[in-house]
Amino acid sequence: MVSVAEVVGQWIPTRARTTSKGWRGANAVCCHHRGHKPDSRGRGNWLVDSQSHVSYSCYNCGFRCRYTGDGLTDSFRMLLSWMSVPQDIIDGLKMHELQKSFEGSSNVEINNSVISPEPLWEPDPWPQNSQLISQLLEQNNQDLDFLQAWHYINQRGPSVMRNSKYFWSPYLGRWKMRHRVLIPLRDQKTHIVGYSARWAGTPSGGQPRYVNSKLPTDYLFNSHMLYNNRHFVVVVEGLLTAISIDCVAVMSHVLSQGQISQLQHSGKEIIIMPDQEQQNQDLIDQALQLNWAVSFPQWEESCKDAADAALRYGELFTVRSIIDARTTSDLKIGVLRQTIGKNNGV
Ligand SMILES: [Zn+2]
């Protein structure tokens, strides 16, 4: 008997691309069945996770459903038929799920035989001889690449320096680590679970700006903020922006389902602070669907993100201006999102 995860894997549109954190994106299959215009912008998202659970989320019409190993819901069966899975296969899966529910929890073996579970998550080692930048300064290290890394992080402003520790490694390797600043990534208990290596300046030779160590599924940067006693949680895309105003970062242009549910379960008021670049507005689309606030602070043109604003106005003023400029009105968000990026380069 094939599993639900396997059927989904076989019937995901063939041209689906892999996006962040294992999600696969392709044109949504739901919209035109629900009275919306068919999707042509690849806004359907599928995730089969290591437990063989399946999530589907459409950023076009907002249709979402999940399969979590205990029965097929009506909406999930609908999804399968919209994906053109033949009716007899869907019926077979439905029968099989029913049988499982009668047999109690004897389905463990079935799942394992179909998709081998991912190994338990284990952190990557840090690059060789990584050391705190503050210690290297005390030791009067004169390595030019180190000084460049220190200069880069220092010029990002006092709040960036204050709100995190930074490391440097003389290791070169594929990602030319010695040209990067190593930023520790922590879990909700503030234990270090990995690192992000940010190129010190503008990367050269086709190098990416950020290289991350392997991270837990649905990792949110600064997720300990979800468990403190503040009322608001500000969510931004990038790491250094998040450090500069001590808030949460997605570390991607779009939230995964698991990140969304962490935020939803925090019980806090979520404020999405979009990057001031026009191309990526996926977080705004997600905020609209989830009825979260989006903030459009009126900063000077030279501020392209909250990190720049914190450098210019200070951290507290910047956070205050984000909270004050939040809105949940679809209409306002629709108008204000069009102004994003318009000031750049003027
Ligand atoms: Zn849809």
Image (cartoon, rainbow, N blue to C red):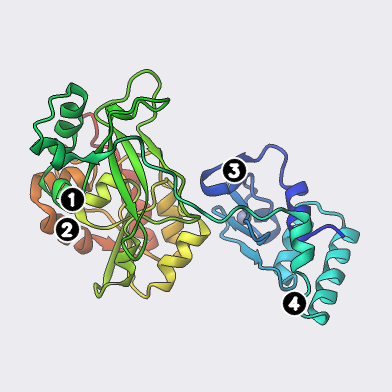
Q: Amino acid at mark 3?
A: Gly
Q: Nearer the viewer, residue 301 or 266?
A: 266
Q: Nearer the viewer, residue 220 or 115?
A: 115
Q: Nearer the viewer, residue 280 or 257?
A: 257
Picture residue at 75% right of the left edge, 52% below the top: 83
Q: Amino acid at mark 2?
A: Ser
Label 2 neighbour load within 10 Å: few <14, some 14-19, many 20+: some
Label 1 neighbour load within 10 Å: few <14, some 14-19, many 20+: few
Q: Which mark is residue 42?
A: 3
Is residue 207 in sight in this rendering?
A: yes
Mark 2–mark 4 Cα distance, whole angstroms, equals: 52 Å
Q: Are marks 3 and 4 in contact (CB under 8 Å)?
A: no
Q: Are marks 1 and 2 in contact (CB under 8 Å)?
A: yes
Where does the image place residue 163, in percent across and percent down from the top left?
18, 53
Where does the image place residue 292, in percent across and percent down from the top left?
38, 65
> According to the image, label 2 marks what residue?
321
Is residue 301 in sight in this rendering?
A: no
Q: Nearer the viewer, mark 1 or mark 3?
A: 3
Q: Nearer the viewer, mark 4 or mark 1?
A: 4
Q: Which mark is residue 298?
A: 1
Q: Upstream in the sequence, badge 3 or badge 4? A: 3
Q: Amino acid at mark 4?
A: Ser
Q: Upstream in the sequence, badge 4 or badge 1? A: 4
- Is 338 situated left or right of 94 in this image? left
User: Which quadrant of the picture is home to ligand 1?
Assistant: bottom right
> According to the image, label 4 marks what residue?
105
Mark 3–mark 2 Cα distance, whole angstroms, equals: 34 Å
- Is 231 situated left or right of 39 in this image? left
Image position of 304 with respect to 97: above or below? above
